[in-house]
Amino acid sequence: MLDTLRQLFEHELRDLYDAENKLVRALDTMAKKVADETLSQAFKEHRQTTQEQAKRLEKVFRLIDKKPRREPCRGINGLIEEFSKFVSQEDPSQEVLSAFAIGAALKVEHYEIVAYQSLLRLAGRLGLTEAMGHLEQNLAEEQDTARRLDEMADQFAVFSTSAYEAPEDSVIIASVNSGDDVQLVDAEPVVYSAVQED
Ligand SMILES: [Fe+2]
């Protein structure tokens, strides 16, 4: 039975560690599949960032005296499968594939952003101040990537005549600590303060 927030933290850390490792491979595939040079380059760069993020998670494992272990991240599995099935079954044109790939990458980023926010909230509750530094760095990178993908999508030739422009980022903020209701707020930098466990 898993009945402490500490165990939940370790579980979610293993889950994200699996996600980052899977994404290193998936971004490699995506970079090769899309013909658009700018997009392909963006995926290659993000692959590099993702590798560094996985390394940072290994530091978090060390900080809590645990060996890095992976727990299958079913959320990311689903998003990766969605991308690969689309490519293999729908036979998209290069233009359609590029448009789809930007959306797919954004889905991944937003999944990761919320995953890091949840993990940070747990780390704050557990007083894992040093671990929080690494997790905050990863979160900031995910938010930056999502912002850049949004900008790319807005400038992308396929979408250049679209009447739609992505709004300022909004994120779901829920508090593990106080049991506050989930609310949708504008994405301000969130401060996760470390709280010592009772
Ligand atoms: Fe990542």
Image (tube, helix red, strand yellow):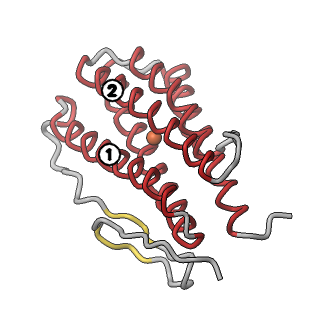
Labels 1, 2: front one: 2
Which label belongs to residue 103? none
Tell me if residue 114 comes above or below residue 76 in the rendering.
below
Q: Quadrant of the N terminus?
A: bottom right
Image quadrant of ligand 1 equals: top left
For label 2, the crowd category at 10 Å Cα-Cα, with few meaning under 14, some 14 to 19 and many 20 or more, is some
171 relative to 7 in the view: left or right: left
First of labels 1, 2 by sequence position: 2
Label 1 to label 2: alpha-carbon separation: 13 Å
Q: Which residue is the site of mark 2?
A: 45
Residue 171 sits above or below residue 100 on the image = below
Q: Position of residue 158 (x, y in %)?
A: 21, 30
Amino acid marked by disc 2: Glu
Q: Looking at this view, is 6 or 47 the one in front? A: 6
Q: Amino acid at mark 1?
A: Ala
**Residue occupying image coordinates x 33% and y 73%:** 185
Outermost residue toward the right in this view:
1
**Image point 48% across, 72% down: which residue?**
194
Q: Which mark is residue 146?
A: 1
Q: What secondary structure is found at the residue carrying circle 2?
A: helix
Q: Position of residue 46 (x, y in %)?
A: 37, 31
Question: From what the image shows, is residue 126 above or below residue 71?
Answer: below
Give the answer, above or below, for where 123 lies relative to 77.
below
**Residue at image coords 46%, 53%:** 135
Choose between 74 and 15: the one closer to the eye: 15
